[in-house]
Image (cartoon, rainbow, N blue to C red):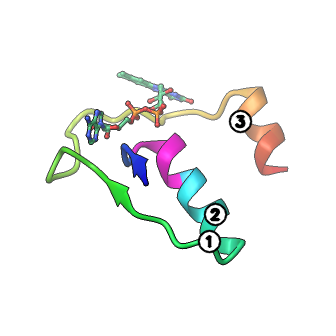
Amino acid sequence: MIVGGGIAGLTLAVKLASCRIRVLLVEKDGKSGLIFKSGLLQPKSLKILD
Ligand SMILES: Cc1cc2nc3c(=O)[nH]c(=O)nc-3n(C[C@H](O)[C@H](O)[C@H](O)COP(=O)(O)OP(=O)(O)OC[C@H]3O[C@@H](n4cnc5c(N)ncnc54)[C@H](O)[C@@H]3O)c2cc1C
């Protein structure tokens, strides 16, 4: 079980699912937040995506 549907929880869920590991992700907020929190990618984030 993964608690939290932020970028960390969602990334882990996708990684585990791609390894055919069943995942249960729980998120306490029922709706998307109104605050935009991903305007830019930091160099470390880009390295992960590279
Ligand atoms: C205003 C703002 C602007 C930002 N801009 C950028 C940017 O431009 N670029 C960038 O790289 N980063 C940015 N950040 C930082 C980035 O948003 C965070 O680093 C990132 O969201 C952290 O991800 P996370 O998954 O660790 O946590 P979070 O995104 O906080 O996700 C945690 C999730 O867990 C859920 N949760 C918590 N407790 C429970 C519980 N008990 N049960 C179920 N669910 C639970 C929460 O509801 C939340 O959805 C910004 C942050 C803010 C506040």
Q: Which residues are magenta?
A: 6-10
Residue 42 - label: none
Q: Quadrant of the N terminus?
A: bottom left
Secondary element under disc 1, as helix, strand or loop, is loop
**Residue for badge 2:** 16
Magenta span contains residue 46:
no
Secondary element under disc 3, as helix, strand or loop, is helix
Marks 2 and 1: CB-CB under 8 Å? yes
Q: Residue at x 58, y 52 (%)?
A: 11
Earlier sequence position, callout 2 versus callout 1: 2
Q: Residues within 10 Å of mark 2 (few under 14, many from 20)?
A: few
Residue 21 - label: 1
State the CA–CA distance, disc 2 to disc 3: 19 Å
The answer to whether residue 33 is above or below residue 35 is: below
Q: Nearer the viewer, mark 1 or mark 3?
A: 1
Where does residue 40 sit, x and y in percent of width and height?
A: 57, 33
In depth, the one of 5 and 31 nearer the eye is 5
Q: Is residue 6 left or right of residue 44?
A: left
Q: Is mark 2 within 8 Å of ligand 1?
A: no
**Residue for badge 3:** 45
Where does residue 39 sit, x and y in percent of width and height?
A: 49, 34
Q: Magenta region's main secondary structure?
A: helix
